[in-house]
Image: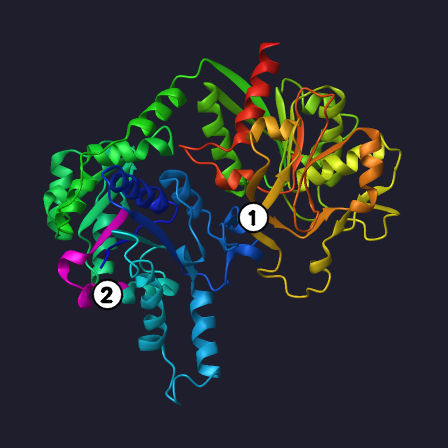
Amino acid sequence: MAKYIFVTGGVTSSLGKGIIAASLAKLLQARGITATIQKFDPYINVDPGTLNPYEHGECYVTEDGAETDLDLGHYERFLNIPTSQANNVTTGRIYQTVINKERAGEFLGKTVQVVPHITDEIKHRMLLLGKDGKYDVVITEIGGTVGDIESLPFVETVRQIQWELPEEDVMVVHLTLIPYLKAAKELKTKPTQHSVRMLSETGVHPDVIVCRTEEPLNDDIKRKIALFCNVKPGAVIEAADASTIYEVPLLMQKEKLDEIVLKKLNIQNYSAPDLTKWNVFLTKLKNPKSTINIGLIGKYIELQDAYKSILESFIHAGAMNEVKVNVVNVHSENITAANVNEQLKGLHGLLVAPGFGNRGIEGKIIAVQYARENKLPFFGICLGMQMAVIEFARNVMGLVQAHSVEMDPNSPDPVINMMEEQKRITMMGGTMRLGSYPCTITKDSLAYSIYGATEINERHRHRYEFNNDYLTAFHEKGMVTSGVNPASGLVEIVELPNHPFFIGVQYHPELKSTVEAPAPLFVHFIAAAKKQAQA
């Protein structure tokens, strides 16, 4: 049987439960203990796939095609192991499953209730990853904040699991906030006391309290929290603000969070922690030799979480190249032919980001043209790749009305078309081309020099594709399609040979970038931008 750790949050949202969960898992992994993390979200959406990025940040896609919460990206980036559909569960998915069972008559005419039917389904999902012996520890992050109405069934299920499993097989880590009042020059513990009391009223008692704080916690404050929240003094952990999320595992190690967990769960077989690779990465991250400016051309730049995986990939690739990547956010709606020089001046590279819909499209196309004509390193992802195709068709091939059928269904030259299997779909949720697909790369291409292989697998999330009816015309004008799906012929990679660095990909390489294995496309893009800066 696996051991189970539940991470809850109190006082306020956005304290970083996902980072704490990922940091703890990393520390356990560094000791030779196999760990995985799952996220239970209280919203009624079945998954984040139909949510606006302004609402929920980016939609993270797993290898098996699940559209999930962005915290799963943190899990993968920290642990360097893939997650799956089983690692992210929402209230909507739970209720959908239970209702489908009721419709099929599985409850034999019983009244279907939150307890036991909803909680039993939650319990089944919570314990699922620990049943096949693959993991020693399963960490479960409970979304939302203690006291939220929608998270009550999850908290009740944790109570039942605490009651059912042996004491040494389950523990609860509660993340809370210790605010600092500048006027009083004092840290206040009362919100934490109320949060723990509210959690205890549900029957769940935390074993460890992790306190987010802007100021250091002295021993007196820790003892006070321990006394009033009924935990051992050593189980109150300081989580000070860090310069980077990748520093948090080391801060948690300093506070001995992993040792507390090992003792509480009675785990005997473990080694001394080995964080050598992690420390090498952090050293490079904190000691860059130069700075480069990368323009991120997007539609959702007001919310940084909308491009979370891209921003983290820049950090990984920047450390690999020993440069600090200064990301310059440029809203594509603000770019025009008249101001493009002003908007993009001082940049050493340009990334046109993914997205959906017509808003800001022309600005993206103008940005691509600027990068192509000014020999500025260019990287397009998904919609960014499609914009590169449209720009080339308009300005090099002379197809002035070329467009994507997503934005202009009546375009006389639909160089980006809807995928055949997507044309019959009417339901929006979970129906795009999702998950990992193979790609065959042409030798003697930029893509081949980046990957060093002719066969790769990358993750997808899209409905529209390069229109192969125009393939020959593009080749004749000099655009190379260097990567294709071997089964469907779908164009995956386009590039321009007569350019320092110009590449667009239909897939999402940012979703597989981790601390220990940065995405090759990002590493080479940053290297090209570094060369541009030096020149």
- At which x and y percent is residue 337? 79, 28
Asked if residue 170 lies in the magenta stretch, the reply is yes
As drawn, 30 above or below 468 = above
> At 35% from the left edge and 49% from the top edge, which residue is drawn?
12
Q: Quadrant of residue 522?
A: top right
As drawn, 353 above or below 2 = above
Q: Secondary structure at mark 1?
A: helix
Q: Residue furthest bottom?
A: 109
* Nearer to us: label 2 or label 1: 2
> Residue 435 bears which disc, if any?
none
- 53 left or right, relative to 229: right
As drawn, 370 above or below 304 = above
> At 68% from the left edge and 25% from the top edge, which residue is drawn?
343
- Tell me if residue 145 can be seen: yes
- Tell me if residue 406 can be seen: no
> At 25% from the left edge and 42% from the top edge, which residue is drawn?
28
* Dot 2 amino acid type: Ile
- At which x and y percent is residue 366? 75, 31
Foreground residue among 332 and 401 = 401
- At which x and y percent is residue 438? 58, 45
> At 18% from the left edge and 34% from the top edge, which residue is drawn?
272
Q: Badge 2 is on which residue?
A: 161
Which residues are drawn in magenta?
158-175
- At which x and y percent is residue 361? 73, 40
Q: Badge 1 is on which residue?
A: 53
Task: Compute the Cα span from label 2 to label 1.
Answer: 34 Å
Number of other residues with Cα within 10 Å of mark 2, as a class: few under 14, some 14 to 19, many 20 or more: many
* Dot 1 amino acid type: Pro
Number of other residues with Cα within 10 Å of mark 1, as a class: few under 14, some 14 to 19, many 20 or more: many
As drawn, 51 above or below 116 = above
Q: Quadrant of the N terminus?
A: bottom left
